[in-house]
Amino acid sequence: MKVAVIVFPGSNCDRDMVRAFELAGAEVSRVWHKETALPAGIDLIGIPGGFSFGDYLRCGAIAARSPICGAVREHAGRGGYVLGVCNGFQILAETGLLPGALMRNRRLKYICRTVPLTITSTDSPFTARFTQGQQIALPIAHHDGNYNATPEQLELLRGEDRIVFTYDDNPNGSVNDIAGIVSANRRVLGMMPHPERAVEAAHGNTDGAQLFAGLMEALGTADA
Amino acid sequence: MTEPQISDDLIAAHGLSTSEYGEILRLLNRDPTFTELGIFSAMWNEHCSYKSSKKWLRTLPTEGPQVICGPGENAGVVDIGDGLAVVFKMESHNHPSYIEPYQGAATGVGGILRDVFTMGARPIAAMNALSFGMPDHPKTRQLVHGVVEGVGGYGNCFGVPTVGGEVRFHRSYNGNCLVNAFAAGLARADSIFYSAASGVGMPVVYLGAKTGRDGVGGATMASAEFDDTIEEKRPTVQVGDPFTEKSLMEACLELMATGAVISIQDMGAAGLTCSAVEMGDKGNLGVRLDLENVPVREADMTAYEMMLSESQERMLMVLRPELEAEAKAVFDKWDLDFAIVGETIAEDRFLITHNGETKADLPLKALSGTAPEYDRPWERSPIPAPLEDIPQIGPFAALEALLGSPNYASKAWVYEQYDTQVMADTVRAPGLGAGVVRVHGTRKLLAFTSDVTPRYVKANPVEGGKQAVAEAYRNLTAVGARALATTDNLNFGNPEKPEIMGQFVGAIEGIGAACRALDMPIVSGNVSLYNETDGSGILPTPTIGAVGLIDDAAQLIAGTAHSGCVALVIGETHGHLGQSALMAEAFGREEGDAPPVDLELERRHGEFLLANRQWITAASDLSDGGLALAAFEMAAAGGVGLTLDSGDIGQLFGEDQARYLVACTFDAAEFLLSEGYRQGIAIETVGKFGGKKLRIGGHSGPFSEYLSLWSDSFEARLG
C-alpha cells in the first residue's frame, strides 16, 4: 500500500499518521500542500489532524482550497482511498468529499480524552477488521467535532449504511452520535477520533491498529 | 517624528530609579535619546536583568556530567545518551495573565516553546503550574477559564502534548495569579544552537511574524507591582498566534539542518532589543540595525516602538551569507517574513538607525554587562512554633474536606482541555504523578514533573525550598525514572521588602542544598518578582520543574493498583500536620512549621524504590494530603476500593517527607518488607486495594460516593 500524507502549515498529527501507516507496513510519503500532484501510484491519501492554517476562518476551510486539494479530489474521483482524521475530517467536509460540517463542541470546550465508540458498519476497508457493534476506545482531541448535517444528508447516510463509528457517550453534541462517516463508494473516511494514537502497546490501547491493518489487507497487495 | 524630551516623569515611567539614570548618564556622557531610554529600561528592568536575584542565583548548582548547557542560554541542555539531548526551561507569564488571561497564558506557552526550539530542539512535552486566588473570589473563575483556554489554545494548536502541571488556589493569589509554563524538546547533542554571534559583517536576519505595537513595555510592566491602574496596562500584553509559531518552528528546524544558522535568539521579553544585545554580547561583537527593514504590521511605527515591541513568533538570526538563498527559500516555503535588518560589527556598539537617522548609539557590552546588580537587605524568616492543639476530626470527614476542595479534587476539567497525546508518544498523561513520553528511535523514556508547596515555603523557606525539589525527585522516582536535572521558576513578592527577600534567599538555600544532594543540577530558570497587589504579596512559590530519564521502557512503573494489591509505605510516618493540606482545608489554619526534609533519607528511599521496581505495580510519592489522599487517588486510578488499616489522623494525613506509597502483589510485599528490614529502610503495610468500599480504621463507606466528590468538585466550583 502506497500512502501520501498531506502536510498543511499547522498540521500536527502528520508524523503520527505516517508512523501508524508505516507500522502497518505501508510505504508512506509526505506531500506539502503547495504541490499540485501526488507521487505516482498512491493508493491512499491521509489527511492528518492538527490546526491547518490555524483553524482561521473555519476549521479546514483554507486547507480545502490549497493547491494539493485538486489532486485529492481527482484521486477520490478515480475511486482512490482517503482517510481524514480530526482536522482531516474537517477538511474533507470543507472539500465536499464528505457531507455535513463539524461545529464547535456542544460545551464550547476543547476535549482530549479516550472515549468509547461503537463500530456501526464493517462494510468498508477501514472497518472490515472490526465486528459489527464492536465497542472500541479511541482518543479524541478537538474543539470542533460536533458533527451536523441536513435531515436529507442524515437520511442518506443512514440509508446507505455510511455511519461507521458512533460515540457511546456523546462528548461533543454530534447529531446521531456520529464520530465517523464514509463516502458513497465507501472509500473516503472522515472521523474525529484519532486511530493513530492507539496503535502501539505504549499507547495503552491498540484499538486503532485494526483500522490500519484493515487497509493493508484491502490495499496491501494492490501494487505488489 | 520628534521624540519626547527626557524628563523625571519619563524616567520614572520607564521604571528607572534616579541612581540607575545617573549610571546611564555616566556611561554615555550625555543625555540618552528617547529610544535609548527605552532600550535601557528594557535591559535593566528586573525581568530581564535579574538585578535583585543574580547574587543568589549564582549559589545554585548548575553543573554535572549530564549537563551540556546550564543557565544563560534560551534553555538548559542535558545529555540523555544515544547522541540525544533534552532541552528544557520553565518561565512565568504571571502579570500578563492576570491582565488578559487568555492571551497572557497563551503567549507564556508560546514563549517557552520558542526558547526550546531556538536551541534546535523539537518540543515534545509541556507542563504548566497555575496558582489562582480563592475559588469564590469574583475574579478567579474568569481567570481559570481564560488561562486554561489560553494554555490549551496555544499548546494544542502548536502540537505539543501537555503531560503534567499543577493547579492551586490560595487567597494570596487573589490579585496576582501565577502562570508558569514549562517546555522540553529533543535535539541531537552535537547540534545545539546558541545565541552568541560570530564573524564581523554577518547579516542579522529577522524571521517570523511582523512587528506590531503589542507588548511595548511589557517587561517593564512585569517588573512592577499592580495597583488599580491595571486595566490601563492591557495594551502591554502580547497577542499570540500559535499557527505562525508552529510554522516558525518547522522553518527554523529546516533552516538549522541546512547549516546556514550561525546563531539564533528568539524575541521574547523586550523583543528586538534584548535579542540583538544578547547575540552581540555573547559573541563580543557590536550590532547595527536598520529599522526601516523590519517587517511591520502597522504604519508609522517609531524606532522606540520597534525596539520595545513584544510581538510574538519572531526570531533573530545571524546567518552564513553564502547560504542566504537557501535560508530564504525555507522561509518562503512556510510563508514567513524574512528580512535582513542589520549586520554584526567589530566595534562594541549597538547602533540603531531608522530611515538614515541615528536613533540609538550605545556601548553594547555595557547594556548587559553594567546592568545594575543589587544586594538587597533581607531578613531570615523566623522559624514558626510547632503546631499544637490539633482539632478533632474523623478520617472520613477529613478526607471529604480534601476531596471536596478544588485544590485536591481531580483536575480532569483542566487537563482534558489540553491535548495530552499529540505526537503519539505520551506513555503517561496528566493526573497520575509525573508525565512520561517516549524518545523516538530509542528504548528511552523521559519523565516530567512540576512541584512546590507554597505554604511550606512561606512557613520555612529553607525546608520548603528543599521540599519542592525532594517532591519532584520523588515524583520522577515513582515512575521508575532517574532524576536528571531541574529548572526553577521563582515567583516571589516585592524584593525591596527585607522579609520577602529573606524568603527568596532561604528558598534558594534549600533548593540548592536539595539539588546538590539529589544530583539534580539547575540548568535553566526564571525569576518573577513583584508579585504583589496593593502591597500584599503572594505565597512564595518557587516552582520546580524536573526531568527524569528511564533508560529502558521496561523499567517504567506505570501500572495501576488492582484488586488484591497490598498498600505499602516506604519511609517513616510521624504524623507531621504543621502546614498540612488537612489543617488548611478542614480548619482554615496555616500554622506550624513545614515538614523537615532529610535529603540523605530522600536519596536512600528513592534508590531503594528504583532498585526494586520490578516488584512494584504502582507507586506514588506522598506529599500534601498524606497517605489518605495518595491512596485514594491510586485506588481511583485503578478503579478499585481501598482499605487503610489505621484510623489515626496523623498516620493518614501527616505530611512527613521521604515517603512513597507502593501497590504490589502479596508476594512482592513480602519481599519488599524483608528487603527493607535487611537494608534498614522503614517500610510497612498500611492497607490493601480491592472491593467497592472505602474502609478506614475499621469504618467504611461506598467508594463511589467519594469518587464522585473527588471527580466533580473542581467543575462544580469553577466550571
Image (cartoon, rainbow, N blue to C red):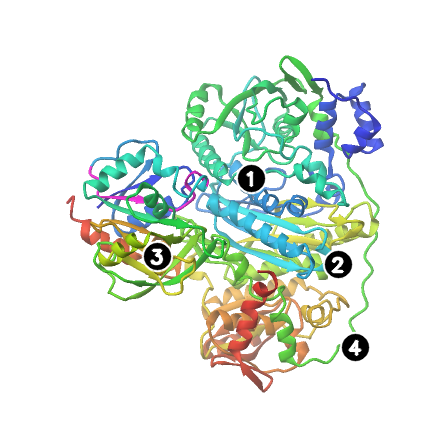
Q: Residues within 10 Å of mark 1 (few under 14, many from 20)?
A: many
On the same chain, marks 3 and 1? The answer is no
Q: Amino acid at mark 2?
A: Lys
The answer to which quarter of the image holds residue A52 is: top left
Q: Are marks 3 and 2 on the same chain?
A: no
The CA span between labels 2 and 4 is 21 Å
Give the chain of mark 4.
B
Q: CA distance from mark 3 to mark 2?
A: 50 Å
The mark closer to the camera, 3 or 1, is 3
Q: Pointer 3: residues within 10 angstroms few (<14), some, or many (20+)?
A: many
- The dot on residue B389 is 4
Span of residues in magenta: A41-54
User: Where is residue B510 shown, x and y percent of the image?
Assistant: 71, 55
- Label for residue B240? 1
Distance of mark 2 from mark 1, alpha carbons? 34 Å
Amino acid of disc 3: Ala
Q: Position of residue B70 (x, y in %)?
A: 60, 42
> In whole angstroms, how far apart are the C-alphas of marks 4 and 3?
58 Å
Residue type, mark 4 in image: Asp
